[in-house]
Image (cartoon, helix red, strand yellow):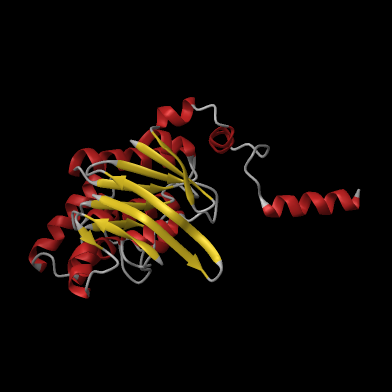
């Protein structure tokens, strides 16, 4: 469904992606993990053509994204639903109108059919009593659920999840994880999940890719990551401060501390 072929991307003199290669199969849930600034969100933006690689290419369902004309790019983007980290709801629209926005923006179905489609999404995500509520009145977890309803309303083939559990308590995080699994089972969507939440990763992913210094450090199943004795993987999975992963800011703080002592 999605393929990255030798993708390079730099911002100024700073390389973010340095020869990335991977394939995501149709119907698969593929998790991208790695430290902050390793290129996870940049990778998502290449999938929908918001960024173009400096070298290499990205293929989505047979279409070459970087070379696509505007008409083809519109068709490619309609294959995607996107759950933004913040939810990105429009504060001027109530829950129902936020969810209906993609249908109306792209005129995907007749206006007379929009209320029924919205009602189905509200029911599926347990939001039935919130149609007229404004985003400012919602909790963080409810905002994520409304945003997910909007992401699936056009029945996309691919859903991109950018840090879907960030800022949520463990119970609501698990609700979102269950919804990601439900989307796969109900619609057979291809899912790409960018996250730091290893508990979530192990629950929802079929495969995981770990990015490090602009490259793919390891690809494998959740079981392979959990069983790995590799010190880099163990440090990331366990969230340990000590290990082979280096942090320039931590090194500077340590040196400053040593001087003070």
Q: Residue at x 29, y 38 (%)?
A: 181
Q: How many marks?
A: 0
- Residue 174 occupies quadrant: top left
Vertical arrangement, residue 17 with respect to residue 244, above or below? below
Question: Do we see residue 45 in this rendering?
Answer: yes
Vertical arrangement, residue 190 with respect to residue 84, above or below? above
Find residue 189 and report its horizontal and vertical position in percent: 22, 46
Query: In the image, is 259 to the left or to the right of 190?
Result: right
Q: Residue at x 59, y 38 (%)?
A: 239
Q: Nearer the viewer, residue 31 or 12?
A: 12
Question: Do we see residue 150 in this rendering?
Answer: no
Find residue 245 and report its horizontal and vertical position in percent: 62, 43
Residue at the outermost right position: 261
Vertical arrangement, residue 25 with respect to residue 113, above or below? above
Q: Nearer the viewer, residue 97 or 257?
A: 257
Query: In the image, is 204 to the left or to the right of 258?
Result: left
Find residue 119 and report its horizontal and vertical position in percent: 18, 54
Find residue 178 and report its horizontal and vertical position in percent: 33, 38
Q: Residue at x 20, y 54 (%)?
A: 61
Q: Residue at x 32, y 57 (%)?
A: 82
Residue at the outermost bottom position: 70
């Amino acid at each position: 469904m999605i393929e990255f072929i030798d993708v390079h991307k730099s911002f100024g003199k700073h390389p973010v992606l340095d020869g990335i290669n991977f394939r995501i199969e149709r119907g698969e849930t593929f998790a991208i993990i790695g430290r902050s600034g390793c290129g996870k969100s940049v990778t998502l933006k290449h999938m929908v053509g918001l960024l173009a690689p400096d070298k290499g290419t990205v293929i989505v369902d047979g279409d070459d994204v970087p070379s696509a004309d505007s008409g083809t790019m519109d068709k490619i983007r309609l294959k995607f639903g996107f759950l933004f980290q913040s939810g990105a709801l429009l504060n001027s629209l109530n829950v129902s109108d936020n969810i209906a926005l993609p249908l109306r923006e792209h005129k995907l179905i007749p206006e007379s059919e929009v209320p029924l489609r919205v009602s189905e999404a509200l029911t599926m995500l347990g939001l039935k009593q919130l149609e007229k509520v404004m985003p400012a009145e919602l909790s963080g977890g409810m905002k994520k659920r409304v945003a997910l309803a909007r992401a699936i309303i056009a029945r996309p083939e691919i859903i991109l999840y950018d840090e879907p559990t960030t800022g949520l308590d463990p119970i609501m995080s698990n609700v979102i994880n269950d919804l990601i699994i439900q989307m796969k089972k109900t619609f057979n969507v291809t899912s790409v999940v960018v996250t730091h939440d290893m508990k979530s990763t192990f629950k929802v992913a079929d495969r995981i890719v770990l990015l490090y210094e602009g490259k793919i450090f390891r690809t494998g199943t959740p079981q392979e990551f959990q069983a790995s004795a590799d010190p880099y993987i163990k440090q990331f999975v366990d969230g340990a401060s000590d290990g082979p992963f280096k942090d320039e800011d931590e090194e500077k703080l340590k040196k400053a501390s040593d001087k003070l002592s």
